[in-house]
Amino acid sequence: MMNKAVLCLFLGVALSGAEVDRTKRGFVSAGGYGGSSGGYLIVGGGGGGGHHGPSSSSIANQAAAQATAAAAGLKGVSQAAASQAASQAAATASAAAQSASAAAAQGQAQAAQITQAAQGAQAAALAESSLSSQASSAVQSAENTYNTAVALANALGHAQAEAQAVAAQALQALQAAQAVQSAQAAMAWQAQQAANSLNQQQSLALSELQSAQAAAAQAQAAASKALAKGGASGYGGQSSGGYGH
């Protein structure tokens, strides 16, 4: 009977040690998120969907069950064996309690890490949402600027076409004015030539008129002299003749 109790006790110790080792292996290494700034921590990850081994309450319950089984196996054995088995059971229970406390501390630390990671992820999500909103506003502003530029380019194109049409009309008017100017200049030259010719003819006519007037004056003077001489000559002859007969 004592051998059975001791066997149960050793079996309980072995199971407790195995559970402790499995508990230690159950926590998967954490992975970081963020950059050099630290970011936030994602705990879990690895393979099987974030399995972290048995909980601290499960370890404590197993330790209590083992201690109870060890105590139950002590009935009917000798006092010395019972005392030794009780000491071993107490040690096993203490080790199990320490393992449970360690598991609870690790669970608490892991929960704190997960909480911190969740807060960091929420802050990152809000920051990304704000940046997305800013990017959307920038896209809308760029689109508005593009539309304005296209409208301005179209307006400038129409204005350029209208300006080219006006310039073509102005060129035609200029060419017509230049043609009129050339024709008018030719007509003015011809009129000046005619005026010069008429001036020469006028000068010649005036010269001839002056010559004719001078000749007429001379003729008139000569006629007057002739008449004067002729009248004097006839009066004297009659007198002579009358008196002579």
Image: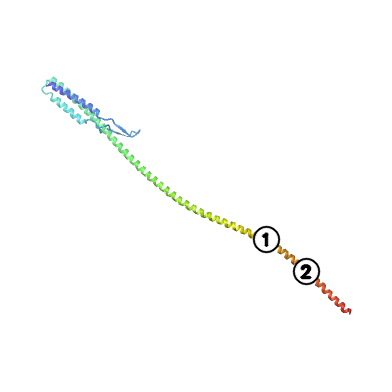
Q: Residue 197 carries which label?
A: 1
- Dot 2, crowdedness within 10 Å: few (<14), some or many (≥20)? few
Tell me the quarter of the picture where residue 103 sits: top left
Circle 2 residue = 219
Identity of the residue furthest to the right in this view: 244
For numbered disc 2, what is the local secondary structure? helix
- Residue type at tag 2: Ala
The picture places residue 59, in percent across and down from the top left corner, at: 20, 29
Q: Is residue 21 left or right of residue 218?
A: left
Identity of the residue furthest to the left in this view: 76
Tell me the quarter of the picture where residue 213 sits: bottom right
The picture places residue 8, in percent across and down from the top left corner, at: 15, 24
The one nearer the camera, 190 or 78, is: 190
The picture places residue 216, in percent across and down from the top left corner, at: 76, 68
In the image, residue 172 sits, relative to residue 69, either above or below, namely below
- Residue type at tag 1: Ser
Tell me the quarter of the picture where residue 82 sits: top left
Say whether residue 98 is visible: no
For numbered disc 1, what is the local secondary structure? helix
The one nearer the camera, 186 or 219, is: 186
Which residue is located at x 51 percent, y 53 percent?
A: 168
In the image, residue 180 sits, relative to residue 52, either above or below, namely below
- Quadrant of the rendering where the C terminus is positioned: bottom right
Which residue is located at x 46 percent, y 50 percent?
A: 157
Q: Is residue 62 left or right of residue 33?
A: left
- Quadrant of the rendering where the N terminus is positioned: top left
Say whether residue 230 is visible: yes
Sooner in the amino-acid sequence: mark 2 or mark 1: 1
